[in-house]
Image (spheres, rainbow, N blue to C red):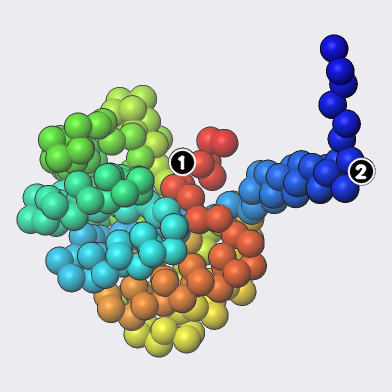
């Protein structure tokens, strides 16, 4: 049997290709992850605009929706799921948990989960409790887990896009969880600018469960 002769140039080219592939895989594995989360939606116009922008950028997000809004705009909930975003529970009417309304709060969580399960076909595990108020016993009672945040640009009380973007980009780090709202035009504009800036810095936008459990 005759052996095949490989020229030096071919060997160097193959070696270079293999090295490039290895480096590219390492770069993908080493990309710092960050989570963009949105409360209080979906909004009939701004949420759709946001989903369009995220899709164009290949970015994933997590949406903690109100049950009443989900019922009103079911197609947006379905689109969120179909495009790989996480859909979470933000109660039905944005009720805040207090000492005297535990059962009402629990009923809103259950009602919203039923709405979301009907729309997505999946159980909702993650909750963004309004104002961060939570009772840990719900975790065993309802098998729901709270998702809070590490970066809050207070976008709900400001329409200054430049200020919102600056607060987020200065404070964000690997595994940051950014709190925003998709019911305001300024928030959506700021969010897409934030994605552009942080992607340029090498961040990968993922759903919040990848931050919490990976």
Q: Secondary structure at mark 2?
A: helix
Mark 1 vs mark 2: which is more N-terminal?
A: 2
Looking at the image, is 161 positioned above or below residue 178?
below
Quadrant containing the C terminus is top right
Residue 98 position within the rendered picture, expressed as x and y whole percent measured from the top left = 28, 49
Residue at the top extreme of this rendering? 1
Mark in the foreground, 1 or 2 = 2
Q: Does the CB distance between marks 1 and 2 fall below 8 Å?
A: no
Rounded to the nearest angstrom, the CA distance separating label 1 from label 2 is 48 Å
Q: Residue 17 vs residue 200: left or right?
A: right
The residue labelled by disc 2 is 8
The residue labelled by disc 1 is 209
Q: Residue at x 49, y 78 (%)?
A: 165
Quadrant containing the N terminus is top right
Residue 212 position within the rendered picture, expressed as x and y whole percent measured from the top left = 52, 41
Q: Residue at x 79, y 42 (%)?
A: 14
Q: Residue at x 27, y 75 (%)?
A: 184
Q: Quadrant of residue 6?
A: top right
Looking at the image, is 161 positioned above or below residue 183?
below
Residue density around tag 2, few if under 14, some if 14–19, many if 20 or more, within 10 Å: few
Q: Residue 22 vs residue 154: left or right?
A: right
């Amino acid at each position: 049997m005759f052996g095949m002769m490989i020229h030096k140039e071919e060997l160097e080219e193959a070696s270079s290709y293999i090295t490039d592939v290895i480096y590219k895989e390492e770069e993908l594995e080493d990309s710092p992850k960050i989570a963009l989360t949105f409360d209080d939606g979906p909004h009939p116009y701004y949420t759709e605009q946001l989903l369009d922008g995220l899709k164009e950028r290949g970015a994933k997000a997590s949406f903690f929706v109100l049950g009443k809004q989900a019922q009103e705009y079911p197609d947006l909930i379905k689109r969120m799921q179909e495009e790989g975003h996480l859909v979470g529970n933000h109660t039905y009417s944005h009720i805040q948990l207090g000492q005297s309304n535990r059962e009402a709060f629990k009923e809103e969580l259950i009602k919203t989960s039923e709405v979301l399960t009907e729309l997505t076909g999946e159980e909702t595990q993650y909750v963004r409790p309004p104002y961060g108020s939570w009772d840990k016993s719900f975790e065993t009672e309802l098998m729901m887990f709270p998702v809070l945040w590490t970066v809050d640009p207070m976008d709900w009380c400001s329409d200054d896009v430049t200020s919102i973007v600056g607060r987020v980009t200065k404070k964000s780090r690997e595994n940051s969880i950014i709190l925003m709202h998709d019911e305001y035009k300024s928030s959506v504009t700021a969010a897409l600018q934030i994605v552009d800036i942080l992607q340029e810095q090498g961040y990968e936008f993922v759903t919040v469960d990848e931050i919490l459990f990976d």
